[in-house]
Amino acid sequence: MKSIFTTVLMLMMGTLPAWAALGESESSVTSDQQYVKGEYRLEVRQGYQLHQITAADGSFVREYASPEGKIFGISWRGHSVPNLQQLLGSYMTNLQQAPRQTMRRRALVVRTDKFVFVSNGYMRSFQGHAYVPSLIPNNLGPEVVQ
């Protein structure tokens, strides 16, 4: 089972380039957009900012930033899983070391007090999200990260 998880995790770590990392400053979002050469959209919502980068193939990554400028959540949907090392930053260790729960054959779920990660999909159709509960602004709930 551990080798299957390791294989899936290695596949997931891979195909889209750098993004602003979970728990870090939102300042790198613009450079992410330039690197991907995707369409960038910023939405100012009540209590947070939503940065979305959409690639030419329709894949996208959303980065949720608190008023303090910290990325508290990320979500993605596309033909492949984005580079999780880049998206999760220092929280990648939480994903690698936490006990895993599987909802279905194609889903990977990690839920701890410090970190939540959900990823599912199949060939050419992947989606997921991750967030840090302690970084979510007080006036919001975790359901905002989708």
Image (cartoon, rainbow, N blue to C red):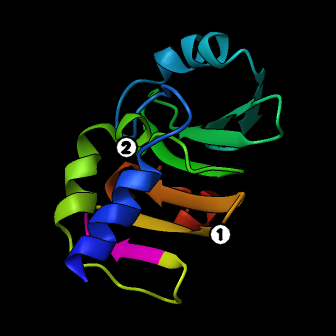
| Residue shown at the point (35%, 85%) measured from the top left | 101
Using the image, determine if residue 19 lies above or below residue 10. Answer: above
- Is residue 120 among the parts visible in the rendering? yes
Q: Nearer the viewer, residue 39 or 11?
A: 11
Labelled pair 2, 1 in contact (Cβ < 8 Å): no
Q: Residue furthest bottom?
A: 104
* Residue occupied by mark 1: 122
Q: Secondary structure at mark 1?
A: strand
Residue kind at label 2, given as amino acid type: Leu
Residue 117 in the image, given as x and y percentages of width and height = 42, 64
Residue 67 locus on image (x, y percent): 52, 32
Q: Earlier in the sequence, mark 2 or mark 1?
A: 2
Q: Quarter of the image containing the C terminus? A: bottom right
Which quadrant is the N terminus positioned in?
A: bottom left
Q: Is residue 5 left or right of residue 16?
A: left
Does residue 129 appear left or right of residue 55 in this picture?
left
The magenta segment: 108-114
Q: Is residue 112 visible?
A: no
User: Measuring 46% from the left and 37% from the top, which residue is drawn there?
Assistant: 71
Q: In which quarter of the view is residue 43 placed? A: top right
Nearer to me, 4 or 66: 4
Q: Of discs 2 and 1, which sits in the foreground?
A: 1
Q: Residue 41 in the image: x percent, y percent? A: 78, 26
Question: Label 2 crowding class (10 Å Cα cut-off): few <14, some 14-19, many 20+?
Answer: many
| Disc 1: CA contacts within 10 A as few (<14), some (14-19) or many (>=20) | few
Q: Is residue 56 magenta?
A: no
Image position of 123 (left or right of 81) = right
Q: Which residue is mark 2?
A: 88
